Amino acid sequence: MPEIRITDARIRFGRWEAELVTDVPLAEPPEALHEGVALPGVESEMLDAAAGRWRVAVPIPPQILSDGVQTVLVRLRGAPEALARFTIVTGQPLDEDLRAEIDLLRAELDLLKRAFRQHVAAGAEGPAATVGPAA
């Protein structure tokens, strides 16, 4: 099975850039998908043929930037699994969503703590608490 990995990934000047290292030749550049739609302008450049190193760049179109979380998958064309993914988080509503999610997690944690304490207290009063010589 061929080994393909992404290293040194970053977003810079509106472009996601990374180095792709592979032990098989690439027939065509990887593709980038946002919500299942291929993004235009994906570039690849061979850095070192002997080492199988390529530079891959994905321009981030302004159309995909909107409030919330946007995820872009990078994969070889037609491959079922992603080589890499990058996520862009924007907007005011996200702050509120995260706060609401944290509040929900805190509430659930409080419920679990309360139930655990009740369980431990009930166990301490049960048969384990009356261990001793039989009368």
Image: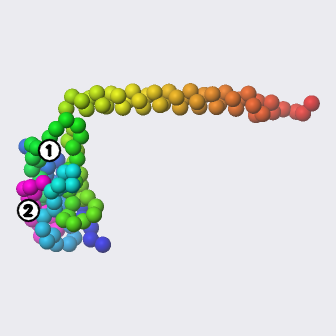
Contact flag, marks 1 and 2 (Cβ < 8 Å): no
Circle 1 SS class: helix
Query: Is disc 2 placed on a helix, strand or loop?
Result: strand
- Alpha-carbon neighbours of circle 2 within 10 Å: few (<14), some, or many (≥20)? few
Magenta stretch contains residue 101: no
Q: Which mark is residue 64?
A: 1
Q: Amino acid at mark 2?
A: Glu
Residue 95 spot, x, y in % from top left: 26, 29
Q: Report the residue marked by disc 2.
A: 45
Q: Amino acid at mark 1?
A: Ile
Q: Residue at x 30, y 31 (%)?
A: 97
What span is colored magenta in the figure? 39-54
Q: Position of residue 12 (x, y in %)?
A: 11, 44
Quadrant in which residue 100 is drawn: top left
Q: Is residue 82 left or right of residue 16?
A: right
| Residue displayed at 19% across by 51% down | 34
